[in-house]
Image (cartoon, grey):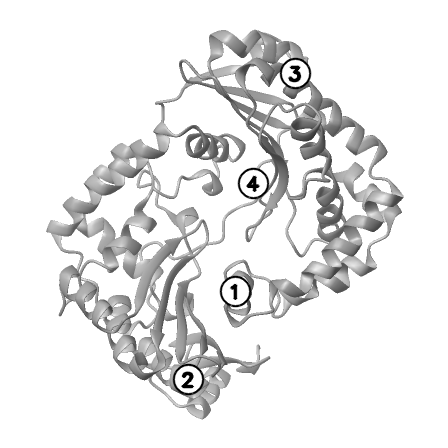
Amino acid sequence: MKSLRKNSMKIILGNSTRSLFALSVLVGLLPLYANAIETRFETDAALPIVYLNVAVKAGAANDLLGKSGITNFVGEMMLRGTKTRTKAQIDEAIDQLGATLAVEVRSEAVIFRGRVLSAKLAEYMEILQEIITTPSFPEKEIKKLKAEVGSQILEARGKDNSLGKVMWEGFLFEGHPYGKPILGKTKETAALTRADLVRHYADLFQDRNLLVVGSGDSEASFVDAWAARLAEKRPNSAGENPVHISPLPKAFDHKRVRFIDKPDRTQTQVYFGQIGVRMTDPSFFPLFLANHVFGGGSFSARLMQEIRVKRGWSYGAYSYFRQGIRPRSWQAYTFPATKDTAAALALIDGMLRNYRESGITLEEFQFAQASLINSAGFAFNTPAKRVENILLEKTLDLPDGFMKTYASNFEKATLPTTNAAVKKFLAPDQLSILILGTAKDLKLKAAESLKVPESSIEVVPYLKE
């Protein structure tokens, strides 16, 4: 059984004392962590401000079948009315405190983020507690939000970069929860009912799924006591659709190419990628180091040098890992002019093959290792960054303190293990490739560049959800 106190983490009990809770667990009277909310708070009196986050360890990946966007919709609706306040009253109360409050929905987390003067923290907590525990989901606001979300989806589809990202996620993770768009699909969000929202809220917002993380000019005990009140208000229940961890994404055994056809494009969006590795995988840090050489965020990275610096085909070219509770993705991205797209596709394909077979050089390895070790400290050098690290650890099921291990793990890497990891991981003939552009101008050229039959390239209209 996990300790109730480990590395400053506290389990906050709702309706019973710690001793009674522990005894009840031992004799089997209560399920483990019934009425419990994890809290992590770092006192920092440098400024009279408190940063407070309430997170749910579930997100868009937990959207119900045929109801894409419901988690985002629930999160937004919770700021639009409680049993005692309207949206206007919530907004006014937050403004009067000089505070901020917003909601962010990720694939595997819903995070309410706020900031308030420490002198006003108690009043702020009262408002936030209402929002978390007694949302009212008024029909009037549901109607308004449907119109807003519909507009956001249409706006995203009008911008090639945001449309390409949504289409890419859906393509790479076809049939998997990671492929669900956070905003949802137009028809599915439009069909959501108040009853759908109430049920989904009840499934997500249970104390076992909640996490309180913050920093600032307050005592941890004060935040602990508030979290205990939240636990009392949001006890566990069976739920109709309890939160679950997504299955493993499917890795494909062949190259797949999809063309998102949008008329009259002078620029294309291009993605190459495959299923990635978890951050806890032994190969992650060697792969991360090698990727810093291949497509990391600096101008010295190979992709940036070849695509932008030497040839001027695109303003940027990058490769990176995305993380989840399950292995998520490794992907390369660039956005060349239409006239340069075919050449860019061929170049990237060749670069990937060379990267896998030859790896990186000793000089590249040493530069990347030093750079990553020297910059690792900046990932937790402020309270705000440490809070974000805790949120990542808890919502992605990582060990406590994992985000502080970057420097030591990069120090352990060697050139042979790094190149061996790349060779084992990267599969150039099994990549998924997405191109957003004008098919009549590029489909045949893309097939020739990628050395695949033109008939194997799937063409999808850009308006198709």
The answer to which of 47 and 357 lies nearer the viewer is 47
Query: For the residues marked 3 and 2, what is the alpha-carbon distance in whole angstroms?
Result: 57 Å
Q: Quadrant of the C terminus?
A: top left
| Residue found 83% across the figure and 39% down from its top | 360
Query: For the residues marked 4 and 1, what is the alpha-carbon distance in whole angstroms?
Result: 21 Å
Per the image, the residue denoted by label 1 is 394
Question: Residue 441 placed where, x, y %?
Answer: 50, 8
Query: For the residues marked 2 and 4, what is the alpha-carbon distance in whole angstroms?
Result: 42 Å
- How many marks the image carries: the answer is 4
- Of labels 2 and 1, earlier in sequence is 2
Circle 2 residues within 10 Å: few <14, some 14–19, many ≥20:
many
Q: Secondary structure at mark 3?
A: helix
Per the image, the residue denoted by label 2 is 218
| Residue found 14% across the figure and 67% down from its top | 85
Q: Which mark is residue 343?
A: 3
- Of labels 4 and 1, earlier in sequence is 4
Q: Nearer the viewer, mark 3 or mark 4?
A: 3
Circle 3 residues within 10 Å: few <14, some 14–19, many ≥20:
some
- Of labels 3 and 2, earlier in sequence is 2
Q: Nearer the viewer, mark 2 or mark 4?
A: 2
The reply to whether dot 4 and dot 1 touch (C-beta < 8 Å) is: no
